[in-house]
Amino acid sequence: MLSTFNGYLDESFLSHHCEFLLTHKPWWDTVDSLGSGVVSPLTINYDLLSLMNEWSKSEDIWLIRAAIQHQRGRKTETDIPLLLKFCHDHADDHTFWVAKAIGWALRDLAYFDRPSVTRFLAEHPSLDRVAVREALKHS
């Protein structure tokens, strides 16, 4: 999605438009599509760490989900400490959509850094079972 419109989206697009789309009548499929097609690429192109931190601290589950997932798909370019921090910050959240986001993020990380995922799971024994199941799905 972003590749088609890359020249038209600047760093303000996430805070001025995408945030509205994520929080008004959202659902997992729209949030995840925006995450992979817009949020992740724009956070690669622009320094939007402060916005991702803001979203992660939000009370809105969809902004939290987008913040956790913004590192997905980066493989060895993943900011592992940041990803694990966002997962840690929400490890006690048993909201299904947040737990699922944590699990997916950890599952992606496990493909190239299984020890970090194993350590994270050991350090968070009360992590929601949905997150654990997703993290271990391809073990």
Image (cartoon, grey):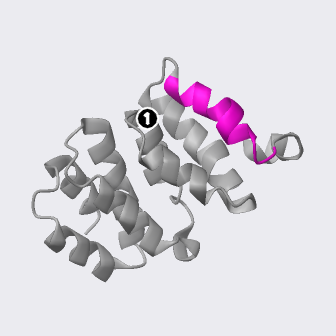
- For disc 1, the marked residue is 62
User: What is the residue that sits farthest to the left in this orientation?
Assistant: 125
- The verdict on residue 96 being magenta is no
Relative to 59, say whether 27 is above or below: above
Q: Give how far across and how far down residue 20 sits, in percent.
A: 60, 26
- Residue in the picture at 52% in, 72% down: 79
Instruction: Give the total of numbered labels.
Output: 1
Furthest toward the top, the residue is 25
Quadrant of the image occupied by residue 17: top right
Residue at the image position 20 percent from the left and 57 percent from the top: 132
Residue at 27% x, 46% y is 99
Residue 62, given in percent of the width and then of the height, sits at: 43, 35
Label 1 Cα neighbours within 10 Å, binned few <14 / some 14-19 / many ≥20:
many
Residue 70 lies left or right of residue 93; in this view the side is: right
Name the residue: 16% across, 56% down: 127
User: Please, what is the dominant secondary structure of the magenta stretch?
Assistant: helix
User: Please, what is the three-letter code of the amino acid marked with disc 1?
Assistant: Trp
Outermost residue toward the bottom? Answer: 115
Q: Position of residue 133 (x, y in %)?
A: 20, 54
Above or below 20: residue 114: below
The quarter of the image holding the N terminus is top right
* Element assignment for label 1: helix
Q: Nearer the viewer, residue 59 or 122?
A: 59
Chain part drawn in magenta? 10-23
Q: Quadrant of the C terminus?
A: bottom left
Q: Position of residue 75 (x, y in %)?
A: 53, 70
Q: Nearer the viewer, residue 37 or 92?
A: 92
Q: Is residue 44 left or right of residue 81?
A: right
